[in-house]
Amino acid sequence: MPSVIWWGRFDAGYSRNRILRKLFAELGWQVRDFHPTFSSMGDWEARLRWLPKADLVWVPCFRQRDLAAASRWARRYGIPLIFDPLISAYDKQVDERGKLSADSLRAKRLLAWEQALFRRADRIVADTPAHADYYARVLGVESRKLDVVYVGAEEAKFQPGPLPPERSDEPQEALFYGSFIPLQGPQVVVEAAMLYTGPPLKWVLLGQGPLRSMCEERARGLEAVRFEDWLPYERLPERIQRADILLGVFGITPKAGRVIPNKVFQSLASGRVVVTRSAAAYPEALLAGDSNGLEWVPAGDAQALADRVAVLAGNRARLHQLGEAAAATSREYFSEAAVRRQLEKALAGASV
């Protein structure tokens, strides 16, 4: 049985990690964890603790700070290393948050640091083709070292279910859930609710984050808009099933066009139509097609979102049809079986 060391101060409960660790086990890998006390000195700690050798070192998402030490240890013993960043630190600070100007010395140093880090990995896993393109174009990763492995959803938790029963005294529900960050564009959802003129509908925004208070202020006085606090992950599938329409992301930042957020995967797997911004992150066939469970609107366009939701809310038969199409799209493109095939390809590329 081949073995892989998951290296770093990572969260094993995060959905990306949970899915991949499950798939490693299904592929016959023994997964061992190594959580160094100090990221920068992890290789020394591994040597002092006589960390057993393995067939592969995997540095999971968000763990740029663990990569240098992991690569030093892996190279010392001739073990291939795969990095699954999920985000770029440079992208986050410069393009997404705008905290640094691309022309600033700090930004240039951050870019050089991350470029050097990414060169240390034998292979880089991107969560979308658009992110793979960014890693190649901006971070200088050779195309031959890149693989795409979608995030997907945990199928044991997120499964197709029927629409909520239709009630004459209860309007349908459009559900947005997330961490209220600019990438997600929650303010666009509130603005769409203000512009909405379709059939009776509840707009629910669930979660916490930096833009929530601003959204609550904008929605003051709108009876159709309701805010809910964040739910434990285990209760999220049931909450999705209580909604008729799921809302994805609508941010205008460059990164918003490079990602497919967890909630899109989870909502599709749950058999719910998803209205979201168009983005190069998705397979071309889904962007070019229709009736696939994904309803596209331009980024940041509240009026387009309001109009699209109005069309859907007025046609329950269409919602049912699109819900079935969403589940089919999930199975074809983003199922655990599809993600497992992508992971196998990445492992083969690392010669493990």
Image: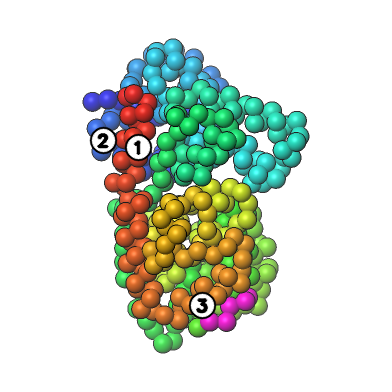
Magenta region, main secondary structure:
loop
Q: Tell which circle, 2 or 3, labels the residue nearer the N-terminal end.
A: 2
| Visible residue check, residue 57 | yes
Q: Nearer the viewer, mark 1 or mark 2?
A: 1
Local packing at callout 3 (Cα closer than 10 Å; few below 14, some 14-19, many 20+) is: some
In three-dimensional space, the C-alpha distance between marks 1 and 2, rounded to whole angstroms, equals 9 Å
In three-dimensional space, the C-alpha distance between marks 2 and 3, rounded to whole angstroms, equals 45 Å
Q: Tell which circle, 1 or 2, labels the residue nearer the N-terminal end.
A: 2
Residue 223 in the image, given as x and y percentages of width and height: 59, 79
Q: Nearer the viewer, mark 2 or mark 3?
A: 3
Q: Tell which circle, 3 or 1, labels the residue nearer the N-terminal end.
A: 3
Residue 241 in the image, given as x and y percentages of width and height: 37, 67
**Magenta segment range?**
194-198
Residue 197 belongs to the span the image colors magenta: yes
Q: Is residue 351 left or right of residue 309?
A: left
Q: Secondary structure at mark 1?
A: helix
Q: Which residue is mark 1?
A: 343
Disc 3 marks a residue whose amino acid type is: Ala
Residue 258 in the image, given as x and y percentages of width and height: 53, 48
